[in-house]
Structures are given as C-alpha cells and as structure tokens.
Image (spheres, rainbow, N blue to C red):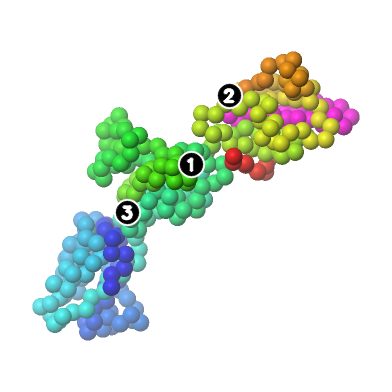
C-alpha cells in the first residue's frame, strides 16, 4: 500500500522504492535491506534501475507506483512495487509570527489552516486575533469572501478570524492550505497593568477594542493592598527608546471627578504602593522592570 496517497510528488522529494525479486532496487526489495533513496530532480523526473528516467512530479504515490509497475512488467511478471516517501521537500509552506515553531514546514497531504498551525506548535498566548494567508495565484484564489488580489496580481490575500475558527462560528474559514502558502500570525495588541494590583500582567486587546484606565484596572481585578491611587502613571512609547510618563489620578476617576483615560497598545499602567517611604522617583524604569516575565492574559 502506498504511503500518504494524497501527497503529490514534486522536485526534491526523496523516496525509497522496493520491488520484490529485483536486486537492482536493493537486495531483492526486502524491507530489511539497506534501501537506496531516489530523489526527484527539478524537472520532476527520477532515474531508476532498468527503467531509466521516469516522470514522478505531479503524480501521487499510488499513481507513481502504477507507473513503475507498468515499466517493470517487461522484466518481471506482476511486479510488487512499494513507494515510501522519506523526505517531503516539494510543498513548503511558511508559518510566521506568533506560533511555537515558526519557519518553513512541509505540507504532507491535505491539511487545513488549524492543522498546519498545530504542526507549527500552535498559537502563542500573545498571538493576535486574525491570521493572514498569502497564496500564489497558480494555486487559485483563497476561497473566502475576504480574499483579494495584491497589487502585483500574483497573489491572493485573505485574513481569517481565530475566534471564528476556534468557536466553529465560521468553520468555512478553516481553509485547505496549498503549497507555498505564507501564513502569518501577528502579535496581539497588548496593554500592561503592574504594581499594586491583584493580577499584574499583559492583557490582549480584542479586535478593534479600545480600553480605558478603569477597564484596564478591572482586567487586573482591582487594586492590591494600600495603592497610591492618586499617583498612578501611564508609560507610553513615544517613538524613542524612552517612554512618556502620563500622570493618572485613579482616585478622582473612580469618584467621577476626572474623565477616564484611554489607553493605547503597549501602554503600561503603573499603580505604586502607598506603603513605600516615598513614591519612586524613577517610576518608568520601575514599571518597565516589573513587566519583564509577566504572564499574558487572553480574555
């Protein structure tokens, strides 16, 4: 029986071919023998004993077995042929971004988007809420309503919702992946809440979600013991290696005496403790240090 019959052979694939009663294919074709590997060349052909050059590219394993049998029938009556693919190299896909093992993976058989993400180690906690797929036009347009052609006309591009696939609300977005697809999982937009709160950490923002300081405090499950709630700060990236410090009086906001403050992606809300002899003068450095190694929470 053929191995992975749905896999279509292509250049650089390597295989072992066993033929009963033919020493030319490796000690009588026995599985215990040292099997000689055969590699498909860039034109899709492979050189075989007795047969010579035989087209393999574009055939699945069963079809290639039948082609070998047809050629060998002039030498052996009813030859028994088994083809085993030992190296899959002709159908690479690139899985980039926030997955366990990003890089180039080989597509073996029919695989859906979630299956190849799983093969790449799954999504990281800090992964975003959409996955981008880029496909060469020769493999057809991506079968999704969101699919569009790029400016070059060479690729089909689509984005799918992670939540829609995971919750089975949009199962049609779990599309079959094609060779040379590029799958990108971006990093989620995050905000951080650190200091005197019950649950310090980074919190992922849902798609197009805007979060205020009070909402961020709620994500962190409220104040810890004895917070200096009048002397909180937002630390915001300002395009340099430094962060801008924005004073926030959470006490006034909670009492409705000051407007709630909108946070941006990568903002850090720092809630100091009132038990310190004095509020740290270098608040920014202290808060950034606290974010190191924090857990990322998805909601």
Classify residue 260 by image quadrant.
top right
Identify the residue at horizontal 74%, vertical 22% (top origin).
254
Q: Residues within 10 Å of mark 1 (few under 14, many from 20)?
A: few
Secondary element under disc 2, as helix, strand or loop, is loop
Q: Specify whether 247 is left or right of 143.
A: right
Vertical order, 260 against 10 (above or below):
above
The answer to which of marks 3 and 2 sits earlier in the sequence is 3
Q: Are marks 3 and 2 in contact (CB under 8 Å)?
A: no
Q: Which residue is labeled 1 in the image? A: 163
Q: Which residue is labeled 3 in the image? A: 91
Magenta stretch in the rendered image: 263-291
Identify the residue at horizontal 28%, vertical 83% (top origin).
27
Query: For this rendering, which residue is in front, 31 or 274?
Result: 274
Query: For this rendering, which residue is in front, 239 or 116?
Result: 116
Tell me residue 7's x, y (percent): 29, 60
Q: Residues within 10 Å of mark 3 (few under 14, many from 20)?
A: many
């Amino acid at each position: 029986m053929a191995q992975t019959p749905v896999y279509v052979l292509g250049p650089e694939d390597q295989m072992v071919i066993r033929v009963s009663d033919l020493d030319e294919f490796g000690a009588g074709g026995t599985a215990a023998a040292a099997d000689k590997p055969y590699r498909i060349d860039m034109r899709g052909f492979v050189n075989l004993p007795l047969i010579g050059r035989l087209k393999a590219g574009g055939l699945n394993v069963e079809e290639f077995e039948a082609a070998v049998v047809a050629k060998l029938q002039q030498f052996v009556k009813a030859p028994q042929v088994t083809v085993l693919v030992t190296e899959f190299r002709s159908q690479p896909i690139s899985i980039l971004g926030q997955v366990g093992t990003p890089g180039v993976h080989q597509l073996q058989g029919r695989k859906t988007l979630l299956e190849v993400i799983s093969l790449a180690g799954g999504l990281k906690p800090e992964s975003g809420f959409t996955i981008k797929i880029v496909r060469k036009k020769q493999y057809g347009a991506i079968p999704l309503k969101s699919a569009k052609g790029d400016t070059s006309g060479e690729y089909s591009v689509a984005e799918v919702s992670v939540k829609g696939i995971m919750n089975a609300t949009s199962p049609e977005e779990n599309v079959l992946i094609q060779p040379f697809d590029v799958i990108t999982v971006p990093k989620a937009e995050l905000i951080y809440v650190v200091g005197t709160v019950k649950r310090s950490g980074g919190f992922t923002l849902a798609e197009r979600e805007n979060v205020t300081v009070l909402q961020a405090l709620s994500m962190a499950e409220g104040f810890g013991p004895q917070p200096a709630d009048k002397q909180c700060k937002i630390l915001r990236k300002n395009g340099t290696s430094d962060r801008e410090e924005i004073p926030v009086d959470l006490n006034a906001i909670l009492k409705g005496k000051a407007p709630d403050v909108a946070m941006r992606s990568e903002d850090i809300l720092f809630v100091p403790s009132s038990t310190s002899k004095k509020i740290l003068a270098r608040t920014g450095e202290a808060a950034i240090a606290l974010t190191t190694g924090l857990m990322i929470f998805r909601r």
